[in-house]
Image (cartoon, rainbow, N blue to C red):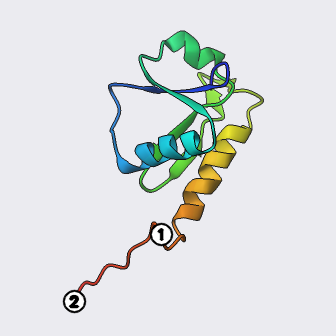
Amino acid sequence: MVDDVLYTPVRGVLEGITRRTAIEIAKDLGIKVAVGEVPVEDLYRSTEIFLTSTAGGVMPVATLDGKPVGNGNPGPVTTKIRDRYWELHSDPNYSHEVDYT
């Protein structure tokens, strides 16, 4: 997060389901999302940084190059997105039973 905008790179990332879901959740929460180039300088100015993965979901980044991101704790935006992400796992509108027979 830089200046109340959630930035995500346009290239060099896996455009997976978890990333897409995090972007959709952010938009649903009224958070402005910008997909494009993310200069390294912006990473160092960020108040919040998170990563996404299938196994980990939305994971806050506490330090960058040994320096705290924000106050070193998960920020409010990351926390909201992470919590909503895990809530969706038990929401029947987003869950489908797989029949392996």
The image quadrant that residue 63 belongs to is top right
Q: Residue furthest bottom?
A: 101
Query: SS at mark 2?
Result: loop
Q: Nearer the viewer, mark 1 or mark 2?
A: 1
Total tally of numbered discs in the picture: 2
Residue at the image point whose x is 32% and y is 79% from the top = 98
Q: Residues within 10 Å of mark 1 (few under 14, many from 20)?
A: few
Residue at the extreme right: 71
Quarter containing the N terminus: top right
Whether residue 82 is visible here, answered yes or no, is yes
Which image quarter holds the C terminus? bottom left
Q: Left or right of 75: which side holds 30?
A: left
Residue 17 percent coordinates (x, y): 37, 50
Query: What's the CA distance linking mark 1 and mark 2?
Result: 23 Å
Quarter of the rendering containing residue 30: top right
Residue 99 screen position, x and y as percent = 28, 84
Q: Which residue is mark 2?
A: 101
Q: What number is the disc on residue 93?
A: 1
Q: Amino acid at mark 2?
A: Thr
Q: Which mark is residue 72?
A: none
Query: Which residue is most to the left?
Result: 101
